[in-house]
Image (cartoon, coloured by chain):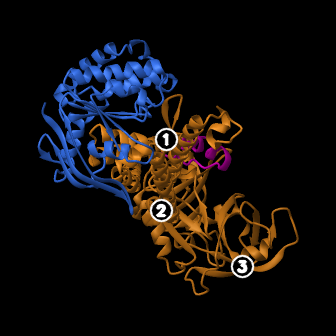
């Protein structure tokens, strides 16, 4: 399998406190990786770093062979939009918008307005795939954690990114919804996406191809 | 929802999330209201009052835009001469056919047929430019304000003999008194409208005071010192006082030697440029001093009113600037508050690919919305305010002021509001755009 993300000697510190020291890893295409460790070990920091949300680090970061340390900010924004999908523990849905609008959020920054209709069609497919039709008329704030997380996952998959990054997506979910989410990630991984998930729950490790401990 | 929605008091329903939303909406409401207030002030104090007229001047404007006013002692006297003419609706032709009989024929209509009425002149007062003509037909007494033209003035010389019959007729001559004479005759009482009689060798003459002027220079050419007995209308004891009256040139020839004193010019107006010239000639007379009276035409009066309103505007501008600054700071504060509440959203948008420019544009557009909403609200409320004032002011003050709002003002209001909100949104928008997305998502 092809190495999608290559990290070498990544160092990150907050002030004088080091969070990551000489971290190196390869993330392959179609691989489901879980990052785990105790509190304060830098799991979320590492995920944000991989997702290029935080670029204040030292070391080497290659994405499909391209050095992300030297990439321009506009290039990085484009990569986040087209190549990465994020799923967060807090869901981070926009309360003033409906299900469809939340799912379509990445399309606003896709720089390709000709695909607006295609995006609408893709979003409706995802709504159907995740059984969200019944939620279309409801306020986001009235939905359960599982429902909101399904919407967040659908949003992350709108532009069909090859990389899926999830920061403790099942942290606020019940076991049933946890299973559904992880099975979804498993399916995406089997479909060829690189899935990187941060978790501190050992009970879900069996879904992953690899576990990285910090 | 109630007042708690605006004040955000804790007595109102509260989960934490709804409380924050309430505070945000309250902040936004106050911001838009804060933007509207200076804009309303701008509309009212600057070019908001663009069209106005006063009740009295409306009459002038109706008949002649070149209306002329003669101010004496600072009081504006607006004649209703033209109204009289309009009221009578009759054409006047003064044809002096037989000046020895002091009769003229006046064209009139009786049952829609033109007729000529014989009129006897019983009184004439004024100056070389014109004055008041009193005449009668049978028992009907008329008084017209007239203007003399040069060719007719020469005919007046033949009235010398007729003057004798004039002075014997009992009629009331309108006059203007000097202040010192008024003080002698009437004391502290306001004389306009009062009547007094002057008795002398030529008989009794009755005058009605229509205005006062400051004392004319003693060296005035046509000013005669009279030694006449004066008594008031209601028959008080005669008061032998020197009566100082102003005698216009044309009236001197009406009186025989030894009889001195008659009325001065009355305040008359003709609403035309000739009238302005007539008034100017009064000012140019040797016995008139510019400081005693002033001549104001309609346009000048409107310019003076313009200047007055402009001065009001100038006072309002510093207040407007201060209010714009305060409302701008309110906008900035609201935007910062909004950013604080939406940190997660900002991080999310960066995570899905939004660049710095996208976030910057988003918050600038939100500021633009606040500006447009504030401007629209200000224009709407100002329109209502002007409508109410246009109804109330004539009723309360008897003043027909008409307030309007021009499209240029509306346009300026929107531009000012948009400019203000964009300027004061820049810093918050910049802060949001350059926020660290990883930290924003964690908060």
Residue B5 in which image quadrant: top right
Question: As rendered, which of B4 and A196 lies closer to the eye?
Answer: A196
Tell me, yes or no, whether dots 2 and 1 are on the same chain.
yes
Taking the spot 48% from the left edge, 66% from the top edge, the residue there is B279
- The correct choice, above or below, for B365 with respect to A115 in the image is below
Q: CA distance from mark 1 to mark 3?
A: 59 Å
User: What residue is pinned by disc 2?
Assistant: B321
Q: Chain of mark 2?
A: B
SS state under label 1:
helix
Question: As rendered, which of B258 and A17 lies closer to the eye?
Answer: A17
Chain B image colour = orange
Return the mark for residue B377: 1
Horizontal and vertical percent position of residue B312 = 53, 62
Q: Chain of mark 1?
A: B
Q: Is residue A113 left or right of residue A127?
A: left
Q: Which chain is blue?
A: A
Tell me, yes or no, whether dots 2 and 3 are on the same chain.
yes
Q: CA distance from mark 2 to mark 3?
A: 52 Å
- Work out whether mark 2 precedes mark 3 in sequence or the reverse, and give the earlier one: 3
Horizontal and vertical percent position of residue A110 = 21, 34
User: What residue is pinned by disc 3?
Assistant: B180
Residue closest to the far bottom: B219
Question: As rendered, which of B199 and B436 lies closer to the eye?
Answer: B436
Horizontal and vertical percent position of residue B430 = 35, 54
Quarter in which the N terminus of chain B is drawn? top right
- The correct choice, above or below, for A187 with respect to B334 in the image is above
């Amino acid at each position: 399998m092809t190495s999608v993300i290559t990290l070498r000697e990544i160092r990150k510190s907050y002030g004088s406190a080091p969070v990551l020291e000489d971290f190196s890893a390869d993330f392959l295409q179609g691989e489901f990786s879980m990052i785990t460790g105790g509190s304060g070990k830098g799991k979320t920091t590492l995920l944000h770093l991989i997702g290029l949300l935080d670029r204040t680090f030292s070391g080497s970061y290659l994405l499909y062979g391209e050095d992300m340390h030297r990439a321009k900010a506009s290039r990085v924004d484009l990569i986040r939009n087209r190549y990465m999908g994020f799923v967060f523990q807090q869901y981070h849905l926009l309360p003033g918008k409906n299900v469809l609008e939340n799912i379509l959020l990445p399309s606003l920054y896709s720089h390709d307005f000709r695909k607006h209709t295609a995006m609408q069609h893709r979003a409706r497919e995802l709504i159907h795939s995740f059984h969200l039709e019944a939620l279309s008329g409801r306020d986001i704030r009235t939905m359960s954690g599982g429902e909101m997380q399904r919407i967040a996952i659908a949003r992350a998959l709108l532009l069909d990114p090859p990389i899926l990054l999830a920061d403790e997506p099942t942290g606020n979910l019940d076991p049933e919804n946890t299973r559904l989410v992880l099975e979804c990630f498993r399916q995406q991984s089997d479909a060829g996406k690189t899935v990187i998930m941060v978790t501190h729950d050992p009970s879900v490790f069996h879904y992953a191809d690899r576990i990285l401990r910090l | 929802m109630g007042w708690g929605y605006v004040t955000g008091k804790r007595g109102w329903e509260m989960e934490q999330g709804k409380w924050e939303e309430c505070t945000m909406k309250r902040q936004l409401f106050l911001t838009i209201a804060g933007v509207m207030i200076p804009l309303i002030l701008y509309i009212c104090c600057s070019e908001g009052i663009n069209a106005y007229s006063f009740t009295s001047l409306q009459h002038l404007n109706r008949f002649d835009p070149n209306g002329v006013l003669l101010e004496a002692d600072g009081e504006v006297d607006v004649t209703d001469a033209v109204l009289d003419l309009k009221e009578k609706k009759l054409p006047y032709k003064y044809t002096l056919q037989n000046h020895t009989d002091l009769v003229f024929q006046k064209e009139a209509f009786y049952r829609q047929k033109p007729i000529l009425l014989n009129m006897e002149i019983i009184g004439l007062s004024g100056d070389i430019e014109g004055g008041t003509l009193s005449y009668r037909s049978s028992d009907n007494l008329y008084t017209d304000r007239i203007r003399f033209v040069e060719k007719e003035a020469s005919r007046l010389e033949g009235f010398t003999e007729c003057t004798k019959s004039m002075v014997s007729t009992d009629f009331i001559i309108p006059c203007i008194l000097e202040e010192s004479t008024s003080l002698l005759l009437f004391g502290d009482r306001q004389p306009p409208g009062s009547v007094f009689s002057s008795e002398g060798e030529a008989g009794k003459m009755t005058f009605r005071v229509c205005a006062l002027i400051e004392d004319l220079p003693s060296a005035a050419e046509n000013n005669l010192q009279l030694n006449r007995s004066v008594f008031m209308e209601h028959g008080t004891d005669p008061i032998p006082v020197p009566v100082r009256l102003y005698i216009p040139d044309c009236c001197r020839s009406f009186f025989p030697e030894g009889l001195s004193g008659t009325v001065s010019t009355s305040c008359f107006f003709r609403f035309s440029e000739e009238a302005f010239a007539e008034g100017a000639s009064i000012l140019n007379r040797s016995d008139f001093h510019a400081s005693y009276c002033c001549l104001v035409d309609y346009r000048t009066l409107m310019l003076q009113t313009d200047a007055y309103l402009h001065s009001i505007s100038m006072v309002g501008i510093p207040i407007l600037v201060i209010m714009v600054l305060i409302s701008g700071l309110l906008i900035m504060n609201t935007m910062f508050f909004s950013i604080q509440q939406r940190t997660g959203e900002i991080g999310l948008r960066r995570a899905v690919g939004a660049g710095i420019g996208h976030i910057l544009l988003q918050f600038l557009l939100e500021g633009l919305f606040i500006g447009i909403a504030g401007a629209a609200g200000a224009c709407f409320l100002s329109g209502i305010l002007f409508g109410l004032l246009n109804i109330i002011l004539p009723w309360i003050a008897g003043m027909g002021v008409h307030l309007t709002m021009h499209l240029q003002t509306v346009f300026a209001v929107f531009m000012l509001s948009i400019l203000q909100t964009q300027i004061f949104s820049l810093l918050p928008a910049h802060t949001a755009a350059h926020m660290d997305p990883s930290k924003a998502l964690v908060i």
